[in-house]
């Protein structure tokens, strides 16, 4: 019994699913179709760090005790409250950082034309080799179905746990990670409301802003003030590029959708995109906005 208890963990459990997988499987006619679908699944697994090859990611997963399980087109991710890193920094920061990582992985998939849907719960799981038993995974799976849009939803338990966590008080209101990462969205296409990971601002904030090769010589010989200006210009240039890729990917999914229920999800996502761009850039550049894909105006969030 003690052996079993040692394998019971508490923390975040995420279930992530590739949208449109069944339809693509049914539509396969050639080995090339199979190859492309296999490559898509492999990219999703890589973007979510399933079996990472680089030492830094391996070390990060070891000190956070994070596991990423993959089967078919699905991923199950677990991050416990008790880990080497959590013992030093506290699990609030560790787990909130993992929610941010979910956002970055989701955004990376999206700009590459791969749309996912996921659910995250906070609760128990038991794992023994390749066997995973978890009421939290069941809730995450059910939430993934309810979310209905290409985003990652979190249960009320996740939002309550972090909102009421004692370590939250160490953050100034302007740096509070809760409203930065989690946002309640009303009027989803299925008529429900959910807490979702607000992935676009997180992805845009993480843009590197590389100095273009043609500008490297000038950058190296410039004074610190000019270098700062060039880095700032590179950051906003790359943010605009990321937003353009994201918009193009949504348009592409909308154009290829064969059912009204599927198109409605991308109409909603287009509205989310435009709202996020306006929030991030302040004055939204018109060329970065998708506009109303299906004459469906309205507010998308509370």
Image: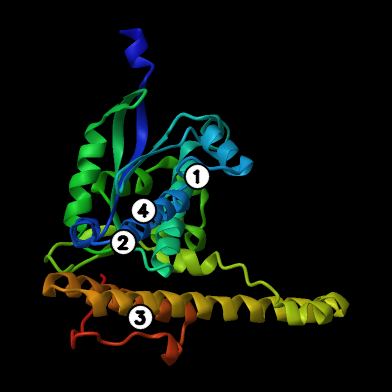
Q: CA distance from mark 2 to mark 3?
A: 33 Å
At a point 18% along the width and 88% down the height, the residue shown is 295
Q: CA distance from mark 3 to mark 1?
A: 29 Å
Which type of secondary structure does the marked residue at label 4 adopt?
A: helix
Crowd around label 4: few <14 · some 14–19 · many ≥20 (10 Å): few
**Front position in the image: 99 or 87:** 99
Q: Which is nearer the N-term, disc 4 or disc 2? A: 2
Q: Nearer the viewer, mark 2 or mark 1?
A: 2
At a point 56% along the width and 68% down the height, the residue shown is 207
Crowd around label 1: few <14 · some 14–19 · many ≥20 (10 Å): some
Identify the residue position indicated by label 1 in the image.
93
Q: Which is nearer the N-term, disc 4 or disc 1? A: 4
Q: Nearer the viewer, mark 3 or mark 1?
A: 3
Q: Are marks 2 and 3 in contact (CB under 8 Å)?
A: no
Q: CA distance from mark 4 to mark 3?
A: 32 Å
Above or below for 85 versus 23 = above
Residue 70: give its label: none
Q: Nearer the viewer, mark 2 or mark 3?
A: 2
Q: Looking at the image, which residue sits at the far right?
A: 221
User: Where does the image place residue 45, in percent across and percent down from the top left?
Assistant: 42, 49
Identify the residue position indicated by label 4 in the image.
38
């Amino acid at each position: 019994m003690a052996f079993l208890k040692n394998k019971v963990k508490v923390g975040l459990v995420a279930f992530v699913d590739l949208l449109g997988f069944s339809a693509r499987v049914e539509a396969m006619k050639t080995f090339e179709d199979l190859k492309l679908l296999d490559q898509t699944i492999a990219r999703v697994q890589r973007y979510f760090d399933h079996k990472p090859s680089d030492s830094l990611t391996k070390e990060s997963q070891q000190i956070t005790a994070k596991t990423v399980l993959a089967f078919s087109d699905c991923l199950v991710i677990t991050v416990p409250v008790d880990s080497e890193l959590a013992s030093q920094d506290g699990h609030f920061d560790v787990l909130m950082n993992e929610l941010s990582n979910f956002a970055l992985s989701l955004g990376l998939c999206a700009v590459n034309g791969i749309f996912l849907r996921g659910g995250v719960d906070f609760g128990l799981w038991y794992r023994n080799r390749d066997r995973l038993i978890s009421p939290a995974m069941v809730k995450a799976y059910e939430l993934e179905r309810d979310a209905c849009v290409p985003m990652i939803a979190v249960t009320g338990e996740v939002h309550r746990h972090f909102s009421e966590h004692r370590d939250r008080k160490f953050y100034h209101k302007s740096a509070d990670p809760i409203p930065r990462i989690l946002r309640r969205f009303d009027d989803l296409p299925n008529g429900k409301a959910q807490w979702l990971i607000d992935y676009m601002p997180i992805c845009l904030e993480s843009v590197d802003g590389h100095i273009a090769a043609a500008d490297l010589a000038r950058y190296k010989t410039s004074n610190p003030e000019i270098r700062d200006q060039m880095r700032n210009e590179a950051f906003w240039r790359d943010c605009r590029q990321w937003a353009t890729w994201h918009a193009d990917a949504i348009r592409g999914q909308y154009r290829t959708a064969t059912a009204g229920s599927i198109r409605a999800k991308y109409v909603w996502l287009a509205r989310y995109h435009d709202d996020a761009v306006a929030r991030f850039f302040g004055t939204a550049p018109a060329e970065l906005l998708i506009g109303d894909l299906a004459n469906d105006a309205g507010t998308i969030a509370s």
